Amino acid sequence: SIVLIDENDKIKNRLYSFGSHENGRTGVGLDSSCSLQKVKNVENLEFKVISSRNDNSAAISKDGELYVFGINESGCLGLGNRENQYIAKRVKSLKNYICDDVGISHNHMIMVSRSKLDGKRYYFSCGTTEHKALALNQFEDNNNNRIFEIPTEITFFDNEKPDDFPMRVSV
């Protein structure tokens, strides 16, 4: 489990985890302790959004940077590989975007972001196209399961514009 904790009533939401650290799912390395601990590599950052499932987690810093950790065999962490991540790591491919929301599951992740250049809203997803989970209609078909290891922009049909959709996601 991961939680945001307000430290010393200064509204500094720090990222903590507890429970089984198997497969790096809690971001504290391979420590066998189940006690409450700060997630490694982000100890001094403040966070505004967290999303977690059984085997992986994502968190958005106050500055809009996306950090991920846990099982990554489907590329769902968006790091450009399929290696499990035992401590929090920033998703560098989104460096030109401010992340506003994230939803993560065992095999895919969806992000709502704004461009740092023009402020326009963009939706991205990564992981496996199994069950059309990525909303990447231009790449999905019923016969082939594809893996996207880096966040890929979701394109919409007809006259739909990303600014017309809600800013919250849930997967």
Image (tube, rainbow, N blue to C red):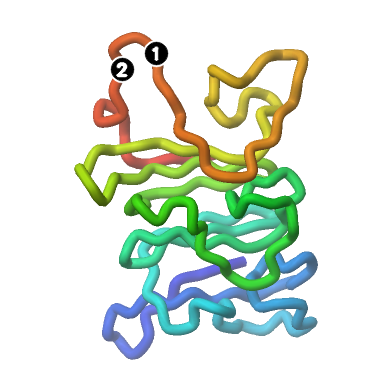
Q: Return the residue found at the far left.
A: 118
* Coordinates of residue 90 in the picture (x, y in percent): 51, 64
Which residue shows up at 54% across the image and 18% down it?
Answer: 138
- Mark 1 near mark 2, Cβ–Cβ under 8 Å? yes
The image quadrant where one finds the N terminus is: bottom right
Residue drawn at (32%, 40%), measured in percent from left and top? 167
Q: Nearer the viewer, residue 5 or 86?
A: 86
In the drawing, does residue 77 fall left or right of residue 67? right
User: Is 34 or 157 nearer to us in this picture?
Assistant: 157
* Up/down of 2 relative to 105, above or below: below
Left/right placement of residue 53 relative to residue 30 reads: left
Q: Which residue is mark 1?
A: 157
Amino acid type assigned to the residue bearing label 2 in the image: Glu
Secondary structure beneath label 2: loop
Q: Position of residue 93 (x, y in %)?
A: 48, 52
Give the residue displayed 68% in from the left and 42% down from the top.
Answer: 107
**Label 2 Cα neighbours within 10 Å, binned few <14 / some 14-19 / many ≥20:** few
Q: Compared with residue 124, is residue 158 higher up or lower down, i.e. above or below?
A: above
Q: At label 1, which amino acid type do we have? A: Phe
Q: Position of residue 143 (x, y in %)?
A: 77, 14
Residue occupying the far top of the picture: 158
Toward which corner of the image does residue 157 lie, by quadrant?
top left
Task: Locate residue 144: give its quadrant.
Answer: top right
For label 2, the residue is 160
